[in-house]
Amino acid sequence: MAAATSSTALISAALPEKGATRLATQLLLAVAGSLLLIASAKTKVVLGPVDMSLQTLAVLGIGAAYGLRLGVATLLLYMAQGAMGYPVFQSTPEKGIGLAYMLGSTGGYLLGFVAMAAIVGWAVDRGWGRSIVKMLGAMLVAEVVMMALGFSWLSLLIGAEKSWQFGVVPFIVPDLIKVALATAVVPAIWALLPKKG
């Protein structure tokens, strides 16, 4: 039984066991998570020449709190909202909406967000959220995968050198800070939760 309780996402303790209530709760959580992603995309922090959002932190948090399935479903709901033309991304509607925006310079990073939630969700589903070392490892891998996807797509559009200079370098330190913050928060929340006996 101990293995079962250690291999769950943070939100699992609040979910009903089964049935329509569980599904309704998951849908509500997915919508709430997509609203958090929208708010985090629109919250800009100016550090140097690039405006940065809190979105990476929100994606890491959703993956850690929701686990693999609900985390990915939440990110896909967010992407669907953007594909339908709603101004959910950082620079919409100023730089275009819908699929045109998603296939632009941020397309790889958007795909990377889904991968990021999947990696962190997979890790917490296996109980890694209780260990700061394992959580740090999972979040660093998720960050590298997200940046690699973003860099790869951007390289097709503007070339590797400019992609590295404008699409990776300015984000390394801020994203590492977000990874460190998310890594510290997840085990701390687990420590506060009552242990099942």
Image (spheres, rainbow, N blue to C red):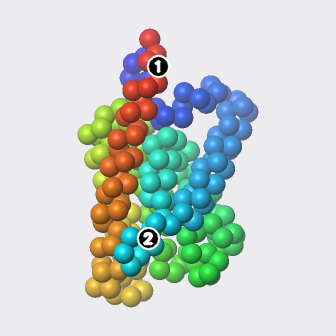
* Residue found at the far top of this picture: 197
Residue at the disc numbered 1:
194
Name the foreground residue: 140 vs 125.
140
State the SS at label 1.
loop
Q: Where residue 25 sits in the image (x, y, percent)?
A: 68, 37
For mark 2, does the 10 Å Cα neighbourhood hold few (<14), some (14 to 19), or many (20 or more) residues? few
Query: Is the C terminus in the top left, top right, bottom left or bottom right quadrant?
Result: top left
Residue, x 71% and y 38% (percent of image)?
24
Q: Amino acid at mark 1?
A: Pro
- Vertical placement of residue 27 versus 90, above or below: above
Residue 118 visible within the image = no
Q: Where residue 22 sits in the image (x, y, percent)?
A: 67, 33
- Vertical placement of residue 34 versus 19, above or below: below
**Looking at the image, is mark 2 or mark 1 nearer the viewer?**
2
Residue, x 39% and y 18% (percent of image)?
2
Name the foreground residue: 129 vs 126.
129
Q: Amino acid at mark 2?
A: Val
State the SS at label 2.
strand
Q: Where residue 136 sits in the image (x, y, percent)?
A: 30, 45
Residue 96 visible within the image = yes
For residue 43, side relative to residue 152 (left or right): right
| Quadrant position of residue 37 | bottom right
For mark 1, does the 10 Å Cα neighbourhood hold few (<14), some (14 to 19), or many (20 or more) residues? few
Residue at the disc numbered 2:
46
